[in-house]
Image: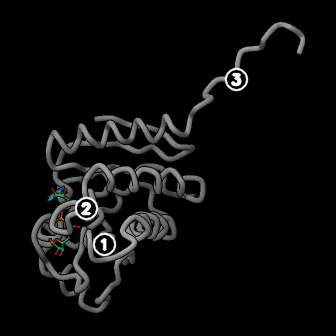
Amino acid sequence: MTARTFGRLRIECVRGDIANQPDVDAVVNAANAALRPGSGVAGALHRAAGPGLDEECRALAPIAPGEAVITGGHDLPNPWVIHCLGPVYGRDRPEPALLAASYRNALQLADERGLESVAFPALSTGVFGYPMAQAAEVAFQTMADTADALHSVTRVRFVLFSEADLTLHERVLGAVQASRCLYPEPPPRSGRGV
Ligand code: APR
């Protein structure tokens, strides 16, 4: 597990199953527009949550790319599920702006509810075809950009399915932090009285 901090926001990357993250307030669903059970993340979350989640979702559908809505967690170990519709790569344009909106809207919803912790999957990188390295950069830049505006959310977990996906996300997270910390220490004084 790798963790980096942006202001008060800690971002963790772990390998695991988004449906088995009992120590976070909300898990994020990589949803379809109709908010119905699907494959991948949506399948795993709906299976674990039971039919009550599907019932609650019907009243909130459809949603648009970049939008996020919140429901209860039903039989999941988490009290809340935040459903995001990421962009379909090559169809919903501009993809980076729509993917950034998904992450930003999910974080804002969690913050409005006073939640402390949220676990995300890599939105749009499965069935929706978004190249993973590009999607990871959008995700972490957006989280870093949003960090200062958050009041209650202090911990974000990125849950990756494979070791390769975890390694890639750890690398991108480190690069995003490095790009924002060019001068972590004050520059040395020249000593020439300039
Ligand atoms: N836990 C964590 N990550 C997972 C899990 C899981 N249980 N299952 C899949 N993943 C990973 C995938 O490997 C991929 O990197 O999550 C990422 C997102 O994959 P998808 O679930 O396919 O989400 P997305 O690309 O946003 O496509 C959404 O897929 O299931 C349908 O109904 C859904 O139409 C919607 C579309």
Measured as percent of width and height from the top left, residue 33 is found at: 25, 83
- Give the spatial CA distance, label 1 vs label 2: 8 Å
Residue situated in front as seen by the camera: 106 or 137: 137
| Amino acid type at mark 1 | Pro
Going by the image, does 126 lie left or right of 99? left
Instruction: Provide the secondary structure element on which disc 1 rests.
Output: loop
| Amino acid type at mark 3 | Pro
Looking at the image, which residue is at 21% across and 56% down? 18
| Label 2 neighbour load within 10 Å: few <14, some 14-19, many 20+ | many
Up/down of 8 relative to 116, above or below: above
- Ligand 1 within 8 angstroms of badge 2 C-beta: yes
- Give the spatial CA distance, label 3 vs label 1: 41 Å
| Label 1 neighbour load within 10 Å: few <14, some 14-19, many 20+ | many
Instruction: Provide the secondary structure element on which disc 3 rests.
Output: loop
Could you say which disc has been placed on residue 87 in the image? 1
Would you name the residue on which mark 2 appears? 130
Q: Which quarter of the picture shows residue 80?
A: bottom left
Name which of mark 3 and mark 2 comes first in the sequence.
Answer: 2
